[in-house]
Amino acid sequence: MNYKVFVDGQEGTTGLKIHDSLSKIPNIEVLKIEADKRKDYEAREALLNEADVVFLCLPDAASKESVSMVRNKKTRIIDASTAFRTNQEWIYGLPELHKKQRENIKQSSRVSVPGCHATGFLLPIHPLVAEGIIPRDYPMSCYALTGYSGGGKKLIAEYENSNREQLRAPRHYALSLNHKHLPEMQLYSGLESAPLFTPIVGNYYQGDAVSIPLFPRLFTKTMTAREIRDLLASYYQEERFVQVAPFDSEANLEDGFFNLMQRNHTNYLDIFVFGHQDQILLVSRFDNLGKGASGAAIQNMNLMLGFDEGTGLE
């Protein structure tokens, strides 16, 4: 069976990556809108209602408008914005979140793609909260170092077309401590409050590492760093795209340094556990444009259409 797919926002960073993956998938007919009609209401409405699957790669307000334009029950929507991530009428598109989530996605007509940093936070933290190891009132904090591609075309242009010296160093942002991924990070982790989250953008194109420090003395159960690693490895042992590294910190490093770009151009996410008796550090490594965006969107489409989950992905 052939399926018609439309990417609303096809010229953005995520939209272009989705198109690249779609070109590798058989039985897909990609519907495209002419460049001069991308903001034409009637042209967009026609394509949105013709498609079997729609990807929304738009700002929040535009995504909400596109959803309101769908007039039929056939079109299934996968939204990459933050507009619906905590909306209980939508399914959160993180198949590995828990054992029922994959089936929830398969059955849904409305799926919201997780934020990149939220993906890196939730996959190591959710199992620990669900298993009662981390208490729900834990004072959580985390930070992320990510490539500038996650900021979209404007930030990409700033880094690639400017010689300003300050762009050479990593830069903290969202220092109001109100980052747009926080609501989903809190909701789907099971924590009573959002983590104190500090994102940092670096002078490189893509690759994300989310780091989460933990203090075992605050756990509800006595657990060593190695035991935390083994629990996560067991939780994700049947997952194709989530890999938990062995508890061997030196083997995970290159001359003592961590390579956060090793999963670039793939849909894989690695979880590392470092630490000792008093302190633990969880690190998620993934491609902010892959598992953190377009790869996750394609993975969700594959589930919704009954394809192999890895079709079109690396």
Image: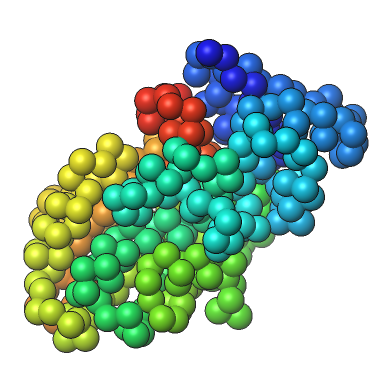
Query: Which color scheme is applied?
Result: rainbow
Residue found 27% across the figure and 81% down from its top: 135
Decide which of 172, 215 is in the foreground and name it: 215
83 relative position to 278: left or right: right
**Percent x, y of residue 132:** 21, 74
> From what the image shows, is residue 143 above or below residue 295?
below
Q: Quadrant of residue 265?
A: top left
> From what the image shows, is residue 276 above or below residue 291?
below
78 relative position to 196: left or right: right
> From what the image shows, is residue 138 above or below residue 12?
below
Q: Residue furthest front?
A: 73
Residue found 77% across the figure and 38% down from its top: 71
Decide which of 15, 250 is in the foreground and name it: 15
- Count of residue discs: 0
Quadrant containing the C terminus in the rendered view: top left
**Percent x, y of residue 283:** 30, 60
50 relative position to 202: left or right: right
> From what the image shows, is residue 198 above or below residue 201?
below
Q: Is residue 53 visible?
A: yes
Residue found 31% across the figure and 40% down from its top: 241
Q: Is residue 161 visible?
A: no
Decide which of 224, 250 is in the foreground and name it: 224
221 relative position to 272: left or right: left
Residue found 21% across the figure and 68% down from its top: 131
**Percent x, y of residue 138:** 32, 83
Decide which of 147, 46 is in the foreground and name it: 46
